[in-house]
Amino acid sequence: MTDIETFYEECYEVDVLAIVLSTVGSVVAIGVITLLLWRLYTYLADRREYAKFELEVKAMNEADSGMENELYRNPVTRYRVPEAVMAKLEEED
């Protein structure tokens, strides 16, 4: 027997399907775990940011409760016709 024949006799056959499936499965599992961790991080960061926003709004509402906006003008206006003008209009009728 030559060395090459001995080499082929001693080696066992490799299960390629198992290697490929385990590699693909581990890559997919790592990707899913990474996405879940990222989702958890963004969820917690958003909750923290929203709580901070609510505190700011509450503080602004408490601070502005007695103050009016300087830029706001009431849209309701009342005009009063002077009595002299009214008397003149009544005379014309």
Image (cartoon, grey):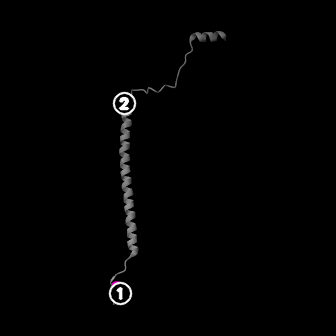
Instruction: Compute the Cα span from label 2 to label 1.
Output: 91 Å
Q: Amino acid at mark 2?
A: Ala
Where does the magenta region start and end?
Answer: 2-8
Position of the N terminus, as image quadrant, is bottom left
Which x, y percent locates residue 51?
A: 36, 42
Disc 2 is placed on an element classified as helix
Q: Which residue is mark 2?
A: 63
* First of labels 2, 1 by sequence position: 1
Disc 1 is placed on an element classified as helix
Which x, y percent locates residue 43?
A: 38, 50
Q: Which residue is mark 1?
A: 5
Residue 64 magenta-highlighted = no
Q: Nearer the viewer, residue 17 or 7?
A: 7
Residue 42 position (above or below residue 5): above
Residue 20 position (above or below residue 66): below
Quadrant assignment, res 66? top left
Q: Nearer the viewer, residue 5 or 10?
A: 5
79 horizontally vs 27: left or right: right
Q: Residue at x 37, y 59 (%)?
A: 33
Which x, y percent locates residue 8?
A: 35, 84
Position of the C terminus, as image quadrant, is top right
Q: Amino acid at mark 1?
A: Glu
